[in-house]
């Protein structure tokens, strides 16, 4: 019985890599300094794994930015606009592709499957001249070897690489990315031969696209690719690793008959149906890497349950061919529980971050080999029992209320057009009403005030005074700009999920539980460990204070249940939808309290609803059903005259348009300006949309200030496909990352554009 780790977080236990990268980018430290921090991190990770007894330790899972970008570098597939002259790719070219430079924008970034990690999308066309331009994989293998650790080098597999790419701009529509397979395989062969020469005996290809809905032509590409590599791979043990979901039956057939492959890795946490496929038929004499330790969550493994699964699997493949592994790279979980100084011991005992998961993997392998660490298993069983019975986890009333929601429907009594009429009587808004998404710039001073209040350095009184002053500034500014529906600016919030989580029961917060989102950026998801309830009103105080400062409508500002769920580490002892319903009930209380307090417009952000969409189409309907239902629960009880807004941050909205309509919000504002055409095409194709809609008229991710003409032009395009009386005018998203010097002129032009068009309609 052996043990394996699919991949490991790169940032370091205290985000050492983040700080080293940012300091290098700012010109405050040298390339050598950065390389040193990176090498130290790699060395400590390898030593940690080998010290824990892991047999198959990955290398080349470190990255200065992203593993897909590393593969682009490996293949020399640098888009021409970066002016790369050939040779080994250095930091200049690499970081220009990742982040752009003074003259060229960055390559596109997109979400890595259904995680919150983002990768750099390769841009390929028939003209790309591939060359072996980064020796990182072999360098890291050698580096580990020099430290006395023989590793399994990891490469993004050739087919997944191509399937995750996009055709470069201007490339003919008939071009097929997979046609490049023959051109990239020679580079893969070169790196394989280098790795062999350096002494590698194993190699891992990550082919996570195998869990998607792939047609037969795409599946065939896998057969072709590995047949093409077969001779190069001879003499090596070859692991093809899949993760994030079940491998569909067809893909399983393809996978298990790949040439040259000797081992298969599966995510058995999310891919429970794969277990049946394995039990049904597993290729003789091949290794099974059983991903039982969850790489995407922070809960301690249920070791007893894992052992019994492993025993079943051992009966199928034989103990000598069974390897205990993680469900996916540990990149998607927090790094080390040791640094959590603020969590109490009970909650801590329920958790395992990456460093603890390594120990779990090894303990499982040992147990199966007959060397069970009884004390470790007993402690684990004790922790599970305590979690089950802890009064902090269970709240009977909440359980009952949430259970009562299942299978029922929740909708506002009146249809949206009648509601909009009732609201208009009360709000009396002009056509093309203007608004913003919620947050205003978060200044250094503002962050300081929040920090000092949290650290008890300033009194509650001082804090309230400072925040009220900030709100009043933001209100005045919006009045001066002549915006129609105002926001309070969210100065009291550090993060749109954390702010609510901190006030709800059932949530815990880490100090260092960071997870890489992209490049040097990390997020720190809250942990939902228990039944969720709302002890008291969360936003009423600030919203009513803000409303009292203006005669214009002030939007109440809440984060929706689905977004809170999708941006947290969620408990696994009950289905996700149950947790979501609980959060929905808590938000519903808040919505109703805001209404009672005289707030007539309430925005419930569902920024992350789309990103929770399951990877497989067969699971979409179920997810959309309960997530949209959860949203409706939050506001089904308000009066017709209360206007419910929602906001979503993504552009790819076409595939879930019916669900968005089904959310039954009165107004939706959506990120749009980077992909006008996509959104407009939905309406051009005749989708009926009767509620208010505000497709963002300018990109808040960029410091660029849009002109009045440009915004007017955008609005005109929308007016061509949408009814005049439902269109709203607003930016793409919240303004918190921008500076006032950008926000003031941009909003001024936005209002001017709306006013200009009003005179023309
Ligand atoms: N109301 C939030 C804000 O304006 C929404 C943020 C988001 O959509 N990500 O910041
Ligand atoms: Zn947004």
Image: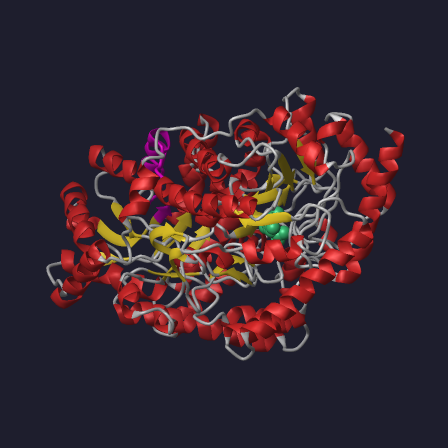
Instruction: Tell whether position 265 is magenta.
Output: yes
Q: Is residue 678 left or right of residue 627?
A: right
Q: For the N terminus, which image quadrant?
A: bottom left
Q: Residue furthest bottom?
A: 457
What coloring was used for the rendering? secondary structure
Instruction: Tell whether position 251 is magenta.
Output: yes
Classify residue 90 by image quadrant. Answer: bottom right
Q: Nearer the viewer, residue 161 or 505?
A: 505
Q: Is residue 642 left or right of residue 240?
A: right
Q: Position of residue 122 (x, y in %)?
A: 60, 46
Classify residue 282 by image quadrant. Answer: top left
Q: Is residue 488 visible?
A: no
Residue for point 48% across, 29% down: 411
The magenta stretch spans which residues?
Answer: 239-266
Residue for point 21% across, 39% down: 284
Q: Residue furthest top?
A: 686
Q: Position of residue 197 (x, y in %)?
A: 41, 61
Residue for point 71% across, 39% down: 169
Q: For the C terminus, which image quadrant?
A: top right
Q: Position of residue 203 (x, y in %)?
A: 38, 54
Q: Is residue 84 above or below residue 17?
A: above
Q: Is residue 260 left or right of residue 322?
A: right
Q: Nearer the viewer, residue 590 or 57?
A: 590
Q: Is residue 169 above or below residue 486?
A: above
Q: Position of residue 212 (x, y in %)?
A: 43, 35
Count of numbered marks: 0
Q: Nearer the viewer, residue 51 or 126?
A: 51
Q: Nearer the viewer, residue 731 or 470?
A: 470
Q: Is residue 144 visible?
A: yes
């Amino acid at each position: 019985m052996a043990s394996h780790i699919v991949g490991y977080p790169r940032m370091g236990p205290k985000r050492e890599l983040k700080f080293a990268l940012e300091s290098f980018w700012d010109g405050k430290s040298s390339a050598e300094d950065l390389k040193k921090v990176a090498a130290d991190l790699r060395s400590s990770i390898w030593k940690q794994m080998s010290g824990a007894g892991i047999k198959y330790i990955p290398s080349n899972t470190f990255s200065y930015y992203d593993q897909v970008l590393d593969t682009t570098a490996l293949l020399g597939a640098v888009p021409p606009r970066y002016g790369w002259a050939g040779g080994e790719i250095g930091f200049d070219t690499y970081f220009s592709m990742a982040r752009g430079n003074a003259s060229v924008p960055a390559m596109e970034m997109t979400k890595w499957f259904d995680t919150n990690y983002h990768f750099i999308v390769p841009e390929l066309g028939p003209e790309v001249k591939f060359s072996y331009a980064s020796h990182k994989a072999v360098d890291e293998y050698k580096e580990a070897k020099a430290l006395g650790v023989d590793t399994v080098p990891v490469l993004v597999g050739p087919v997944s690489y191509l399937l995750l790419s996009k055709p470069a701009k201007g490339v003919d529509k008939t071009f097929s990315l997979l046609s490049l397979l023959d051109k990239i395989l020679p580079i893969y062969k070169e790196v394989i031969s280098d790795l062999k020469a350096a002494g590698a005996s194993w190699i891992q290809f990550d082919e996570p696209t195998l869990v998607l809905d792939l047609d037969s032509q795409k599946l065939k590409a896998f057969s072709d690719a590995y047949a093409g590599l077969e001779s190069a791979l001879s003499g090596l043990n070859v692991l093809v690793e899949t993760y994030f979901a079940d491998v569909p039956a067809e893909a399983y057939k393809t996978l298990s008959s790949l040439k040259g492959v000797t081992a298969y890795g599966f995510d058995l946490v999310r891919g429970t149906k794969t277990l049946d496929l394995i039990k049904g038929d597993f290729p003789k004499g091949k290794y099974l890497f059983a991903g039982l330790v969850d790489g995407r969550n922070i809960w301690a493994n249920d070791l007893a349950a894992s052992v019994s699964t492993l025993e079943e699997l051992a009966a199928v493949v034989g103990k000598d061919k069974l390897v205990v592994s993680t469900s996916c790279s540990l990149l998607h979980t927090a790094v080390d529980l040791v640094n959590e100084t603020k969590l109490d011991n009970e909650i801590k005992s329920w958790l395992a971050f990456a460093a603890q998961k390594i120990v779990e993997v090894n303990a499982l392998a040992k147990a199966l080999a007959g060397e069970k660490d009884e004390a470790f298993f007993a402690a684990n069983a004790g922790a599970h029992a305590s979690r089950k019975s802890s009064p902090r986890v269970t709240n009977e009333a909440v359980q009952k209320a949430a259970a009562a929601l299942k299978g029922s429907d929740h909708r506002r009594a009146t249809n949206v057009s009648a509601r909009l009429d009732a609201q208009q009587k009360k709000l009396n808004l002009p056509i093309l009403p203007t608004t913003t998404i919620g947050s205003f710039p978060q200044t250094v001073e503002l962050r300081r005030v929040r920090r000092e209040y949290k650290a008890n350095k300033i009194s509650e009184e001082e804090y309230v005074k400072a925040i009220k002053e900030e709100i009043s500034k933001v209100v005045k500014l919006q009045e001066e700009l002549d915006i129609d529906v105002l926001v309070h600016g969210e100065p009291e919030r550090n993060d749109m999920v954390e702010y609510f989580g901190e006030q709800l029961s059932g949530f815990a917060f880490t100090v260092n539980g960071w997870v890489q989102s992209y490049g040097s950026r990390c997020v720190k998801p809250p942990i939902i460990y228990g039944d969720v309830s709302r002890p008291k009103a969360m936003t009423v105080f600030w919203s009513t204070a803000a409303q009292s400062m203006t005669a214009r409508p002030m939007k109440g500002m809440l984060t929706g249940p689905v977004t809170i769920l999708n941006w947290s580490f969620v408990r696994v002892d009950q289905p996700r939808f149950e947790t979501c319903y609980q959060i929905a009930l808590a938000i519903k209380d808040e919505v109703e309290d805001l209404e009672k307090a005289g707030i007539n417009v309430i925005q419930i952000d569902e920024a992350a609803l789309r990103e929770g969409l399951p990877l497989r189409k067969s699971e979409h309907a179920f997810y959309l059903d309960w997530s949209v239902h959860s949203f409706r629960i939050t506001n089904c009880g308000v009066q017709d005259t209360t206007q419910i807004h929602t906001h979503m941050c993504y552009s790819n909205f076409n595939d879930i348009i019916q669900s968005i309509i089904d959310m039954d919000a009165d107004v939706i504002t959506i990120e749009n300006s980077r992909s006008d055409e996509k959104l407009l095409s939905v309406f051009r194709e005749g989708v009926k949309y009767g509620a208010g809609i505000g497709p963002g008229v300018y990109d808040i991710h960029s410091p660029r200030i849009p002109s009045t003409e440009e915004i007017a032009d955008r609005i005109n395009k929308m007016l061509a496909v949408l009814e005049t009386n439902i269109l709203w005018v607003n930016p793409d998203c919240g303004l918190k990352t921008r500076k006032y010097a950008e926000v003031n002129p941009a909003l001024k032009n936005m209002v001017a554009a709306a006013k200009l068009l009003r005179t023309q309609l």
